[in-house]
Image: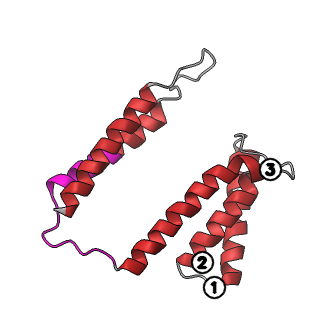
Amino acid sequence: MSDRIFGVFGILLAIGFALSALAIEESFLSDAVGPKAFPLIVAAILGLSSAVIALRPDAEPEWPALGRLVEVGAAVVVMIFYAELLPVLGFVISTAFAAAYLAWRLGSGPIESVMVGIGTSVGIYVIFHLVLGLSLARGPLGF
């Protein structure tokens, strides 16, 4: 039963996400695809995958232990902080902290986690900002 509840919740979330995407106003300067395309694709994938979960649930789903659920909750909190701190600290610093924490929780050691966080942050910055020319949130250091 829990799979079906989760699937229906995902479908409702996808519908809400699609309605929010459809409310995006398009500028006359937008490209041919427009700003609605990507959110609608995400909503469609979420809706389809949630429908599969709701229509084909596991017979005996295994829920993780309380400790694992707390870790998942902590990861969600870190991602919320990431979104809130992105305009304040900028892309590079915020992403380094978030990636380092997530790498640590996935089993890396503390030094490895910091290196993964910095490497991920700088790598994404180089690809998206320097190579592709996309604008990312600037931090107090100007990058």
Q: Position of residue 123 (x, y in %)?
A: 70, 60
Q: Position of residue 108 (x, y in %)?
A: 59, 82
- Tag 1–tag 2 contact (CB < 8 Å): yes
Label disc, if present, on residue 104 of the rendered structure: 2
Q: Secondary structure at mark 3?
A: loop
Estimate the spatial distance between the alpha carbons at disc 1 and disc 2, rounded to whole Å: 6 Å
Which residue occupies 24% across, 75% down? 62
Which residue occupies 46% across, 24% down? 23
Q: Secondary structure at mark 2?
A: helix
Q: Which residue is mark 3?
A: 139
Q: Residue 30's quadrant in the figure?
A: top right
Amino acid type assigned to the residue bearing label 3 in the image: Gly
Q: Mark 3 Cα within 10 Å, few/some/many (few <14, many 20+)?
A: some
Q: Would you say 139 lies left or right of 63 here?
A: right
Above or below, comparing residue 97 to residue 82 in the picture: below
Q: Residue 107's quadrant in the figure?
A: bottom right
Label disc, if present, on residue 109 of the rendered structure: 1
The part of the chain drawn in magenta is 46-64
